[in-house]
Image (tube, rainbow, N blue to C red):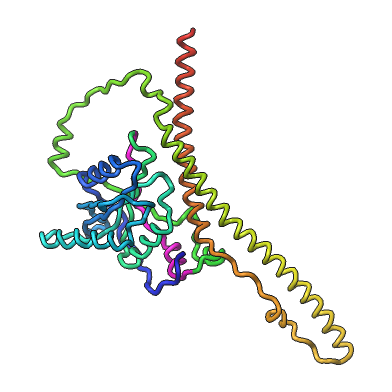
Amino acid sequence: MASKQTKKYQQPTATSINVESSVLLSLIRHTSENYPSLFSGSLLGFEDDEGSIDITHAYPFPYADQYEGGSFRSRSGAKYQQEILDSLKKLEYGVDFQGWFQSTVSGNFVTTQLIEGLAQQQLTNKNAFILIHNMSSIGKEVELKALRLSEGFIGAYIDGKWKSKDLESNKVSYLNIFDELPINIHNQHLVNLYLAGLKDEAKTEKEFDVLNLSSNQNVTAQLLESLYSQVDSYNYDQNNFNYYQRQNQKEVSKITQWKQQRKLENLERAKRGEKELDPEEWRSIFRLPSEPSRYNNMLHSHAIDVLADDILKKCDEELTKSFAIERKLTSAEN
């Protein structure tokens, strides 16, 4: 869990991400070919004068991740990343570390390790970000997101306080953990010229291939398993919080009864002309339970929200196919 930090937060200046198409294709090819294994790596480039980060190189770590963010703060990952940078600087490439990329399935990327690594990097490099490649749409479309932790979340992270009132004061919830940055894909001029010269060719597709209901079966099952796991973790954390609320309510009731009793005692003592007893003595008698951290609860909630959206999208696709098949069969019978 995040603890109090001594570093100060600096407002990011970059407002968008520019990625070379060759870099993006290389990244997608590496993560897709190794699916379902998860891979991450370093994104190198430079900041321009127009408030954008230009990514010109991407180097995956030479091993798969056991979980999202596992390589970001590991010694081997840091050593490999530094070796790549040193090699490029020897060749007089003017690039610096700008962030990471991470392959994942839907909301599973919201792990403590990834959050810790990204938060520490943002406190060192104000424009650091992470490029998320969602593999739940593999084989159909490319889903990428450039994310960085929001100012409110970083504020709570620096304070190291994750109670309900702390989250409220920093105006942070599971809905605004991240800020999303727009991604611009940049092609070289020769590539644009080549693409402009290509002729549009009609793509042929077998009539029923598009209606294949099993196309996303494995991915949908994986999404449901991930959702079950996140909900289970959320319930465990929420049960601890519910226990705290019950214990806190019991102690508050005892304190209220004690205050009423002390008030009656002081009224009787006043009638007898005796000195009033301390009405704040309850502070040394009773001790309210400490509220548990809401840090993990917030991460699980965000992951559940993303997973639920992706599952809903997959279900919409399958329902559309089902209705199309039903209509096709009905018209064939008639």
Q: Residue furthest top?
A: 334
- State the residue in front, 53 or 3: 3
- State the residue in front, 258 or 10: 258
Instruction: Say whether residue 151 is magenta.
Output: yes
Indicate left or right for 56 with 234 as reference: left
- State the residue in front, 81 or 145: 81
Task: Provide residue 249's location: percent of width, then percent of height.
Answer: 70, 65
Indicate left or right for 148 with 319 as reference: left
Q: Residue furthest right?
A: 272
Instruction: Say whether residue 165 is magenta.
Output: no
Tag count: 0
Rendered view: 87 above or below 31: below
Indicate left or right for 212 with 127 as reference: right
Rendered view: 11 above or below 41: below
Rendered view: 221 above or below 275: above
- State the residue in front, 295 or 196: 295
Task: Provide residue 36's location: percent of width, then percent of height.
Answer: 35, 42
At x 30%, y 51%, the residue is: 40
Task: Provide residue 289's location: percent of width, then percent of height.
Answer: 63, 70
Which image quarter: residue 268?
bottom right
Q: Residue furthest left?
A: 91
Residue span colored magenta? 140-160
At x 21%, y 61%, the residue is: 96
Task: Provide residue 48's location: percent of width, then percent of height.
Answer: 22, 58
At x 75%, y 71%, the residue is: 254
Which image quarter: residue 115?
bottom left
Indicate left or right for 231 with 96 as reference: right
